[in-house]
Image: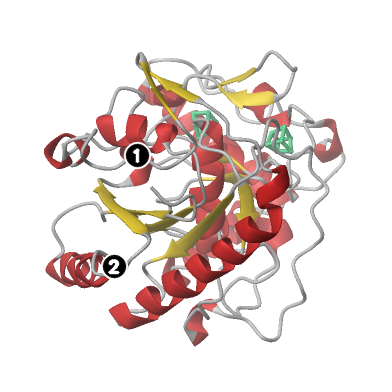
Amino acid sequence: MSRHRLTVVLSQAQGKNPAKRALEESVAAALIMESGLDVSIVPYLYDLDPEHTGRLYMESIGGDMVVLSWMYPRAAYWLLDRVGVKGHYSENQITPPPEKDDEEDSEPAPPKGIGAVNVPNRHIYCLDMRDHNNHTIYVDEVRRIAAECRERRDAEAPKAPVALVQLGGLTTDNGPRTTDQFKPEQLLAQPGRRWYPVIDYSRCTNCMECLDFCLFGVYGVDSLDRINVENQDSCKRGCPACSRVCPEQAIMFPDYKTAAIAGAPVGNISGLKIDLTKLFGGGDAMAIAAQERDRELVADGRSAVGLTVGIPKRQADKTQEPKDDLDKLMDSLDALDI
Ligand code: SF4
Ligand code: SF4
């Protein structure tokens, strides 16, 4: 096998939307005709639990990788990082449609977070299948990425050691596995839907405010004392409360309807004049988050705590807006569906 093969993983959309399935099939059918690519299909990335064959398969891939999924690239990349599918974040060159692009907003703020750890010498490209419904755009971009990866590997070849990857008693060289070793029907076993936060460590400063705020035991710290989404499935479905509390906009819920929380590029949200300090980290946001948290506490048979527990000190002196204003903000965000 050539060391320049590129693995392409297409992550299906949730549900059975025929238009989405048709796009997936068109992309996959075109890509499997390309030389130098190993193409696999797995269910919706966010829903894969630790035992799912699709996730084990992705964990076993050693080389450069393209991931096509129905979510923002930032969310897909950090979701994979969390489960050990690591690599250098690599930008794709697909231009989002105008409604997802914002020429008026400023450039995204430079990353100031603690970053990823143990990143191997390979690159991960995440493409958002929601950007276009023309499959050739994705196929052309994968071709371009394949050429870019070949050039990079050729330049690095003399100093690139071959790493071994261990998976379930099987040892493989650094080349990607194929569906010969992971049966397609196993890869495609449909998982149940999941809901949990994904942390963007390029933005996260390890302040632990999310850990203090969440009263459901979702967050913890890892062996390096870094914030970690420890108990993913303890998170309350549909609630994005802690994403509003994070001062760095580092917490994403890829399935949430507002783009800012789902992982849209920070500082580049839909061309809409939304005051993100109200959505993330402002006094309003904190009150909204507390309301959302209270709703889940009460649903669990516990007492509401309002703003008395786990609220960052930076909010202590902020004047809360009247409830009407909160409702108006929430209504306008819901109406905009950003
Ligand atoms: S609140 Fe945000 S910045 Fe602070 S530790 Fe949590 S994810 Fe990181
Ligand atoms: S959304 Fe709620 S339950 Fe889930 S991690 Fe955040 S605060 Fe905890």
The amino acid type, in three-letter code, at marker 1 is Arg
- Where's residue 240, x and y in %? 50, 42
**Residue 238 vs residue 287, the one in the foreground:** 238
Q: Quadrant of residue 175?
A: top left
In percent of the image, x 85 and y 38: which residue is there?
314
Q: Quadrant of residue 12?
A: bottom left
- Where's residue 271, x and y in %? 61, 81
Asked if 164 appears above or below 243 in the picture, the reply is above
Instruction: Tell me, for residue 11, which label it has, or none.
Output: none
Asked if 92 appears above or below 233 in the picture, the reply is below
Residue 17 visible within the image: yes
Asked if 283 appears above or below 21 in the picture, the reply is above
In percent of the image, x 57 and y 55: which residue is there?
74
Is tag 2's residue or tag 1's residue first in the polypeptide sequence? 2
- Where's residue 303, x and y in %? 49, 17
Q: Secondary structure at mark 1?
A: loop
Instruction: Tell me, for residue 177, which label it has, or none.
Output: 1
Q: Is residue 85 left or right of residue 119?
A: left
Q: Quadrant of ligand 1?
A: top right
Instruction: Tell me, for residue 31, which label it has, or none.
Output: 2
